[in-house]
Image (tube, rainbow, N blue to C red):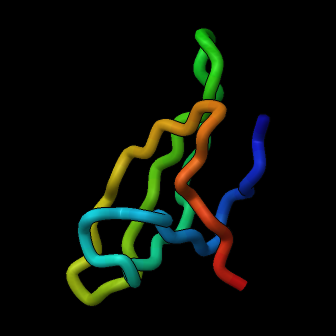
Amino acid sequence: MLRFNHGERVRLAESGEQPGKIYIIKDIKKIRKGGVLYLLKSLEEESVLRLYYENKESLLERIS
């Protein structure tokens, strides 16, 4: 189920908040009930850490 790796740049597709906000994956944990929990750090001057839970439907998309 792991689709992304540590250090990859991603963004949230179809997000209601700032659609161009880019994050870097800082940590990844598999959840027992299924799915993956990502710790994301925004790439801004005043960066923000965000937890994102991914199940079968993902809103994360890779930035090349």
In the image, is 3 to the left or to the right of 49? right
* Front residue (pair 29, 22): 22
Left or right for 41, reference 47: right
Tell me: 35 left or right of 19.
right
The extreme bottom residue here reads 45
Q: Residue at x 36, y 77 (%)?
A: 19
Question: Which residue is at a point 59% across and 32% down the rendered structure image?
Answer: 55
The location of residue 33, given as percent across then percent down, is: 59, 10
Give the farthest residue toward the top: 33
Residue at image location 34% in from the left, 53% down from the top? 50
Quadrant of the snapshot with the C terminus: bottom right
Q: Nearer the viewer, residue 64 or 13?
A: 13
Residue at point 28%, 77% (across, down): 18
Spot occupied by residue 14 in the image (x, y as percentages of width and height): 43, 64
In this view, 20 is above or below 36: below
The image shows residue 4, relative to residue 58, as above or below, that is below
- Quadrant (top left, top right, bottom left, bottom right) of the N terminus: top right
Between 61 and 9, the one nearer to me in the picture? 61
Q: On the picture, is 46 further left or further right than 14? A: left
Q: Which picture quadrant has residue 56?
A: top right
Residue 45: name its quadrant.
bottom left
Percent position (x, y) of residue 23? 47, 71
